[in-house]
Amino acid sequence: MVKVLFVCTGNICRSPSAEGVFRDLVERRGLSGDIQTDSAGTHAYHVGARPDERSVAAAARRGIDLEPLRARVVCAEDFDRFDLILAMDRGHLDLLRQCCPPDRHNRLRLFLSFAPGLGVHDVPDPYYGGTHDFERVLDLIETGAAGLLDHLVPDTV
C-alpha cells in the first residue's frame, strides 16, 4: 500500500481538491486497495472545516465529491505514516522541510513535479480569486494527479 498526503495552507482548497481528484482517479483505475490518500494543511486555520464551497462546486462539476473531507493540520506522525508528502507550492515544501525529520526528507516533493510538461511548479491559491481560478487549479491538479499515478503505477496508462 502506497500512502500519499497532499498539503496546502489551510486544507480547504488545493490539497482537498488534489486528494479528491487523485482518489477518484485511483478508484476509476481499480487501485483503491493499493493507494491511500489524505490531505492536510501547514496551518491550523480551518481544522474540522469542510473544503471551501467554491472548491466543492468546481470539483462537483467534474464529478468529484469533496463534501466528506474535513481540514486538518500536518502532524509529526504524518512523516512516518505517508510514503509521499506532496506540497502544493514551494512555500509549503519549505515549511514541511522545516518540521520533517531529516531522514524523511526523501518523502517530500512538489505535487506538480509529476507534471513537468506544464512548466509550472506551484498550484496557485485560488482562495481570493473567482470561479476561473478554482477551475484552473483543478486543471493543474488533474494533470499532476495523472502524472503521479503514472509514476506510482507505470503500467496503468
Image: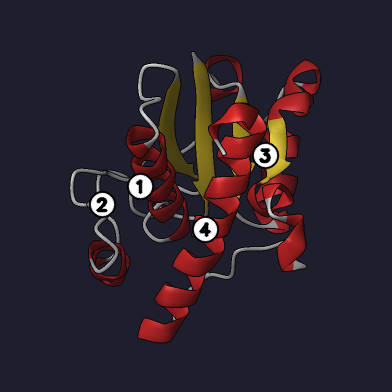
Query: At which x and y percent is residue 27?
Result: 33, 34
Sooner in the amino-acid sequence: mark 1 or mark 4: 1
Query: At which x and y percent is residue 114?
Result: 69, 47
- Judge depth for marks 2 and 3 and give the one in front: 2
Which residue appears at 49% of the width and 57% of the height? 142
* Relative to 137, 57 lies left or right: left
Q: Which of the numbered marks, if any, corresponds to residue 141?
A: 4
Separation (CA) of disc 1 from disc 2: 6 Å
Q: Which scheme is used to colour this image of the protein?
A: secondary structure
Which residue appears at 71% of the width and 66% of the height? 118
Query: What is the three-letter code of the residue carrying label 1?
Result: Gly
Label 4 secondary element: helix
Identify residue for label 2. Answer: 66
- Judge depth for marks 1 and 3 and give the one in front: 1
**Up/down of 76 relative to 125, above or below:** above
Decide if residue 90 is in sight here: yes
Separation (CA) of disc 1 from disc 3: 21 Å
Decide if residue 120 is in sight here: no
**Up/down of 121 relative to 26, above or below:** below
Query: What is the three-letter code of the residue carrying label 2?
Result: Leu
